[in-house]
Image (spheres, rainbow, N blue to C red):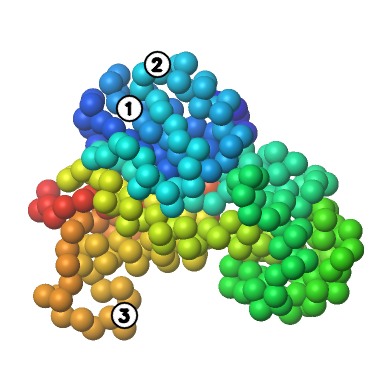
Amino acid sequence: MHSGHISVLGKEVVSLMGDSDQSLYLDCTFGAGGHSRMLLNKYASSRVIGLDQDSDRQTQVDALKNEFPNRMDFYNYNFKDLDQILEDQFDGVLFDFGVSSFQLDQADRGFSFSKPAPLDMRMNRKLGIPASEFLNTASPEVIRKSLRDYGQEKRWKPVLEAILNARGSEVLETTDGLAQLVYEAVGPKAVRLSKIHPATLTFQGIRIAVNEELSVIEEALPKAFDKLAEGGILICISFHSLEDRIVKRYFRTLCGLPLDRFDSRPKQERTVSATALTRKPMKASAEELEFNPRSRSAKLRAIKKGVFSKQ
């Protein structure tokens, strides 16, 4: 695998996924194929079904199919459509949310402002509208939600005003144009105090909105759980607090636990259909952080389908 594309929490994923040589896994976010390769390497007879809405993944898919003959299949699907695949009774299902390092490193995809590029940000370039069109046509309320809620940008007001004032200009057509606009909008003091580029959170929020990332997670999780065999493992890796909150609440619901401190429902009113494997989210080790800084915000949660006594 290319050195720039390192699977986050890969050892943890493989360790949690069980120990059967005949395992069938579903990798809902294939990306560059890193997690799929690790699962295929774990056992001589395991099989992996990969999903990815990005139509540019075929090279990585073909490489794995050649390396592991008759053990790898792929669907060019958004994971919200995973219920349409024929395979069922998976021993493990994996989600690795957010944009992949492979996509970030492709400048022409428009996810990063490290190099000038068209402002696209779509994970599937055959569907939806690019980020440039989104910024030029979406209502101020929708853009505000993208900046304030999805990007969690505290300085969303001047950024929103700058975007609306720039509509119709070339500034909103390129990654460097938008990055410079945000840089100027937040002011020199905010720039000096920021530990990250001032445009980072804005890009994050717009990307989440363009790809409807949170709603597809909410739609996909129950479908993934239904596809699991009894005793199967569901693993989710999140990079954003809003992603992690969706996973946490869904997992707690399946495990019959209170959703939060305000949930006062009695225990007998809760349905238990899964067992938690991670009491708290697993995070990257110091060793992984050293060679893969992008893993610093990753949180892994896992459950097992069915109710099992503690060992």
Q: Position of residue 127 (x, y in %)?
A: 62, 49
Residue 73 relative to residue 111: left or right:
left
Q: Identify residue for label 1.
A: 47
Dot in front, 3 or 1: 1
- Nearest the viewer among 265 and 211 is 211
The relative height of residue 13 versus residue 146 in the rendered view (above or below) is: above
Q: Identify residue for label 3.
A: 261
Q: Residue furthest right?
A: 169
Task: Say few, some or many: other residues with alpha carbon within 10 Å of mark 2 (under 14 / 14 to 19 / 20 or more).
Answer: few
**What residue is shown at x 68% (from left), y 56% (from top)?**
129
Q: Position of residue 206 (x, y in %)?
A: 66, 62
Question: Could you tell me how far apart the alpha carbons at marks 3 and 2 are, in whole angstroms?
Answer: 50 Å
Residue 213 relative to residue 46: left or right:
right
**What residue is shown at x 60% (from left), y 45% (from top)?**
124
Question: Could you tell me how far apart the alpha carbons at marks 3 and 1 are, in whole angstroms?
Answer: 41 Å
Q: Identify residue for label 2.
A: 69
Residue 251 relative to residue 59: left or right:
left
The relative height of residue 145 versus residue 213 in the rendered view (above or below) is: below
**What residue is shown at x 43% (from left), y 52% (from top)?**
80
For label 2, the SS is loop
Q: Is residue 46 visible?
A: yes
- Nearest the viewer among 174 and 263 is 174
For label 3, the SS is loop
- Nearest the viewer among 243 and 196 is 243
Task: Say few, some or many: other residues with alpha carbon within 10 Å of mark 3 (under 14 / 14 to 19 / 20 or more).
Answer: few
Identify residue type, mark 3: Arg
